[in-house]
Image: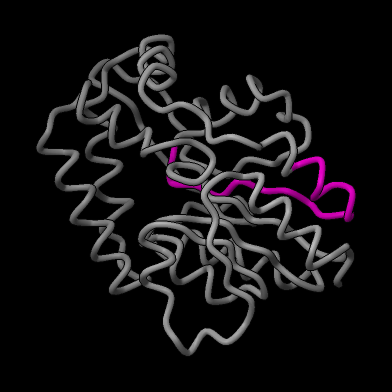
Amino acid sequence: MKTRHAILQLDFDGTLVHGDVNEALFRRFAGEAWSSAIEAASQELARDPSSPALIDALKGASAGLAASDRECLAFAIGNNPPRDGLPDLIETARRFGMECHVVSYGFEFYIRHYLEMAGVEREIEVHGGRTAGSPTGRLLRYTGPAGEDVSADWKVLWTKAFRERAESVVYAGDGGSDVAPAQLCDVVFARDRLLNLMPEAYAVTLRPFETLHDIARGLEELFG
């Protein structure tokens, strides 16, 4: 049953922050080889949205990530600053009655920390990689809308669930993993790889952005 006017689905790395926090953490604490493997898996996912390669690579890299949460957060904040305008964006979305969700291959613990720093943690639901420490690194899992473990089509599953209960879904992202879910949405705000890879056949609203203020202004124009 559709209960909301619209849902705003947000990627995190490269979208709400500058750069890719996961990639930076793996390069620093797990080694350059894992960073390269994840980049290759991301490219494969852009070609084949049903590929399990990215989640497999992220789980492998996480197993070798022995740094503490505190070390990871300190490194992330020092290397990947937040993109300007998140409070403005969330205030605008909420004014139009939108649910706000982050759906990201990033780790929930650092995503939530950035949202807390911006003062919007209570306004956004987070769906990301869930980590648990182990003697050799981190165990990582991704769960779908029904709480099930997911190894492929993860962002797409969440987008489909949003579509089932919203009149429209607005997407904001930047990477290859965003291409398939973005094509299921009514409005897409895109930058970087997502903007370049969106097919010409996508005939609904597609707008570029650089800051999150740009997305807020776009929502004002489209829904105001």
Where, quadrant-wise, is the N terminus in this rendering? bottom right
220 or 183: which is nearer to us? 220
Image-based side of 112 in relation to 56, left or right: right
Q: Which residues are magenta?
A: 90-106
77 or 125: which is nearer to us? 77
Q: Quadrant of residue 127?
A: top right
Q: Quadrant of residue 205?
A: bottom right
Image-based side of 37 in relation to 175, left or right: left
The residue at 22%/50% (across/down) is 39
The residue furthest left is 33
Q: Is residue 197 above or below residue 150?
A: below
The residue at 12%/33% (across/down) is 32
Where, quadrant-wise, is the C terminus in this rendering? bottom right
The residue at 76%/59% (across/down) is 219
Q: How many circles with numbers are drawn on the protein?
A: 0
- Say whether residue 99 is magenta: yes
The image shows residue 165 at horizontal and vertical percentages of 79, 68
Q: Is residue 57 above or below residue 162?
A: above
The image shows residue 62 at horizontal and vertical percentages of 29, 32
Q: Is residue 72 above or below residue 199?
A: above
132 or 43: which is nearer to us? 43
The image shows residue 133 at horizontal and vertical percentages of 38, 20
The image shows residue 81 at horizontal and vertical percentages of 46, 26
- Say whether residue 210 is magenta: no
What's the image's color scheme?
one colour
The residue at 24%/65% (across/down) is 44
Image-based side of 21 in relation to 104, left or right: left
